[in-house]
Image (cartoon, rainbow, N blue to C red):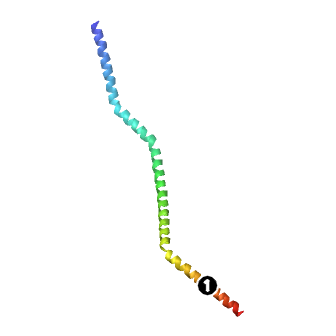
Amino acid sequence: MEDQEMQLKVKRVTDKFTESMYVLANEPSIALYRLQEHVRRSLPELVQHKTDMQSWEEQSQGAIYTVEYACSAVKSMKNSSLYFKNIDGLLHQTISLKEQMSSLQGRRL
């Protein structure tokens, strides 16, 4: 009787040991399979995100260039206030000369 119990216990231990060895032997391949499965599922989405980010970066770079160009144009306009004052003075002179010419022409007629 003890012999049968011992054989039963030994069989259980060997079965558990065999099952554990089987799981350990197959665990890396299962992990690699799961990893490959995950990469295969998530890679297209990651590629799409990368493409979107590159597109947004290009649009952002274009907007930054436009803003920098506008800022430099405003700065150059600020620096040219002297020229605008000269133009204003010349326009006033031209208007007064035109009025003088008109009044001289009116006297001649």
For label 1, the crowd category at 10 Å Cα-Cα, with few meaning under 14, some 14 to 19 and many 20 or more, is few
For this view, does 90 lie left or right of residue 38? right
Q: Residue at x 49, y 62 (%)?
A: 67
- Between 104 and 27, the residue placed more toward the observer is 104
Q: How many marks?
A: 1
> Quadrant where the C terminus lies?
bottom right
Seen as rendered, the residue at the extreme top is 1
Q: Residue at x 39, y 38 (%)?
A: 35
Where residue 99 sits: x, y (%)? Answer: 64, 85
For this view, does 12 lie left or right of residue 57? left
- Between 98 and 16, the residue placed more toward the observer is 98
For this view, does 22 lie left or right of residue 85? left
Q: Is residue 47 above or below residue 77?
A: above
Amino acid type indicated by mark 1: Ser
Quadrant of residue 26 in the image? top left
Q: Which residue is mark 1?
A: 96
Q: Secondary structure at mark 1?
A: helix
